[in-house]
Image (cartoon, coloured by chain):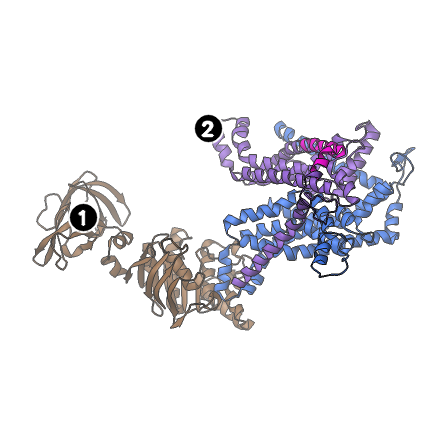
Chain colours: A blue, B purple, C brown
Amino acid sequence: MNTRRFGLIALPYAWLVLFFLSPLVIVIKISVANEAVAIPPYTPLFEGGRLHVTDANYLLLLSDSLYWKAYWGAIRYAAIATILTLLIGYPLAYGIARTPVRWRNLLLMAIILPFWTSFLIRVYAWIGLLKENGIVNHALLSVGLIDTPLRLIDNDFSVLLGLVYAYLPFMVLPLYAQLEKLDPALNEAAADLGARPLHIFWQVTLPLSLPGIAAGILLVFIPAVGEFVIPDLLGGPKTLMIGKILWDEFFTNHDWPTASALAIAMLVLLALPMGLMRRLLRGIA
Amino acid sequence: MNRLSLFLVASLIFGFVFLYAPIASVVVYSFNASRLVTVWAGFSLQWYGALFENEAIGRAARVSLQVALIAATGALGLGTLAAYGLVRYRRFAGRTLLAAMTTAPLVMPEIISGLSLLLLFVALEQATGWPQGRGIATIAIAHITLGIAFVAVIVEARLSAFDRSLEEAALDLGAGPVRVFLTITLPLIAPALAAGWLLAFTLSLDDLVIASFTAGPASTTLPMVIFSSVRLGVSPQINALATLILIVITVLVAGANRLLRVR
Amino acid sequence: MQIERLTKRFEPDAQPAVNNVSLAIDRQEFFALLGPSGCGKTTLLRLIAGFETADTGVIAIDGADMAGVPPYRRPVNIMFQNYALFPHMNVARNVGFGLRQERKPRGAVDARVVALLELVKMRALAARRPGQLSGGERQRVALARALAKEPKLLLLDEPLTALDRKLREEMRFELKHIHQRVGITFLMVTHDQEEAMSMASRLAVMNEGRIEQEGSPEHVYENPANRFVAGFLGAVNLFEGKVAGAEAGLLIVDSEAGRLAVAHSPLAAGTAVAVAIRPEKLRFMTARDTTTPNVLPGIVRTIAYRGEASTCQIELASGQLVRGTMSNGDGKAPVFLPGAALSLSFTPDAARLLQS
């Protein structure tokens, strides 16, 4: 390796080792430390020349059903939201790919724009719509469809709605990229050989869009599992997701070792999908 | 074929109404004269007025802008170097690790990035005395790390599609490597650099979770202010603030999109 | 297959892509639609396949009107120019795709697929994906796939364009051979006149959405109906002029190159015409030989050696450049070098009269 090369790569390399890799090592370290009334609130790894390692935090995660429920809750919410996003996002992406070229860029822009605009604001918007005296209830009451306001917020429905809404562009974009690449002659060839429109979809379009579907599923599922803002703002006290529990352990209970153990648990859960995602990303680049 | 098209048109309409109706409701009610979010009481700009007199929000906005400018610029530099190294140097010791570290933050849940960086800063302070407490610098470092990944992915894609023979033609015509980079490579990847910078900038402006972990008491960012206010309920002032943010970002993105298309 | 007065416009006010086309193709014919790109030949093919809908006119196959019949119910299959093989299916599944749509029993589908792969000599590669095939192999698979359902009419959209030159010439013979074996009507679209003439039993020349001329390759080549056909199908030399009169059963034309005699029915004196003569019908003579009619003195400018013959550019006294073909056959014919003076001549019945 010559010096120019080294100089070029050394800077980002050092930065990422220091600020991406080593923090993860520290999380592992603190997850095996004891909670302590100190600043920082955990026991050091080495003290008096001896190594202090404890499995207490992990045992706590395993023994307390709250963590299990949060773990399972995150998977469940994320999985259902991913399926719903796929069901809404696929026809949307297909529709955009099928519109005439001059409209396509505009529609694509319209999908990307919410992705750039504040996540927090988009989640916040639903509070105004869904709360008990919110816009949706108000509208339904005034047209006489309902007599008493519906409970639309602080439940499973609102959390799923928020997740689907926030992550829909993540599903549509890779699907569109895949569908747009498909040669229309393939559809014509299938029709010419006697396949009806629905069969063409099942036998040609859908199998050829599988890479896009895989990318979309991972892009939605991974961040949804770790989501904190949506369950916090749109979910009620019964909404248990691992991200929300982690936040509470850290900011409310100041239990850094348990928060770290939760982070490691989440990483283990996401290791497989994250690995898959990296492979897909490499395929695209 | 026609039935399918009808279904697709319906999906498009449903999809875009779903995406934009909530945003539209925020914008519309920011001009509502009433404090109640659901009752329309006539057009008013009073919440915008109140917003500009709100010192906490003004301070937070300045912090956010400072952080975002530093973060986007830092991420652009480091991300471009990483992408250039990854695309142009096919083999070097630790290449796989660099590739992994540049893409992993893309899929890393923010809450883990935030927690781990905070723990690093605390440990560093304990060991070396730096950073003294947390503030704009620590948030910016966290956001640079996140932004590197996004910049690198965009620039990497652009560099991979780049026709190397253009650079070879310039070398053949007598331009030195530095000259070639400045006059050929840089202009051709400029759209990707602009897009990368802008993405890093908006991500930083938007981030709540990582900033919450890495901010100090004197460096509250705009999303943090919005979040603590939103937890207490819907407020028309937040609607007004949201509208302003939406306008700024829409203008920026539309501008960037035009930049990218004129090549 | 019968086409009557077919018209298709893509934009309401634009020039029609297919303009009032009528065409009849017999069973088991190998018919070629020949024309430059953008002449409407591909649109015509897509109308027959059912991917486009005509504004007016009728397409009938075996007497059945195809109006409103979707592509998947037409007894027509098409071989696409880029082959449009399904990338996620192997060769055998691609070929069997159409048969599976008819829900034929698996055994029957498999047997037919094997027979087709045998026909196109691709049986050994049945398990490959299209991405692992060469251009020629893909073409064979596309052909087998389009033949699988034994369509009444097989449409071929520029079937050989994507292949390199040597392969293209081999595939011409092979396509003809397969045509004879399967007994299916072939309708081929091409911009390559050599391809059309060497493969088709009948052809039609299209231009700007219209059919300019239709007939056997020999007939169309020897008797082009107009300047476009004459120029598109092979090379031609044109001498513009006016009819001067008739003499001994020949029509006399006063042209820029002098007085020319052509075998043609009488025309009124003064009619503007062009005398068309193919390069290979021009005889090369030494400069002094002026005994025969239709003699054009000139000087050889350039010679392009092509192996079996040489193509020469000759500048006539009028300044007009004329193309001639000099055979390299037996070494007895006189050989001319660039700069040499010579005379070109042709017999009155070798030339054709084109009216403007």
Q: Is residue B39 magenta?
A: no
Query: Residue at position x 71%, y 34% from top?
Result: B52
Query: Residue at position x 59%, y 35% from top?
Result: B194
Residue A151 percent coordinates (x, y):
77, 57
Between A238 and C350, the one lying in front of the other is A238
Q: Quadrant of the N terminus of chain C?
A: bottom left
Between B10 and C45, the one lying in front of the other is B10
The answer to whether residue B90 is visible is no
Q: Quadrant of residue B240?
A: top right
Residue topped by disc 2: B173
Residue B57 percent coordinates (x, y):
74, 35
Query: Residue at position x 48%, y 54% from top?
Result: C134
Residue topped by disc 1: C240
Between B127 and B25, the one lying in front of the other is B25
Residue A80 percent coordinates (x, y):
72, 57
Above or below residue B82? Residue C72 is: below
Side of A113 where C255 appears, left or right: left
Above or below residue C348? Residue B32 is: above
The answer to whether residue A199 is visible is yes
Residue B154 percent coordinates (x, y):
61, 40
Nearest to the eye among marks 1 and 2: give it: 1
**Dot 2: element:** loop
Residue count near mark 2 (Cα–Cα under 10 Å), binned few <14, some 14–19, many ≥20: few
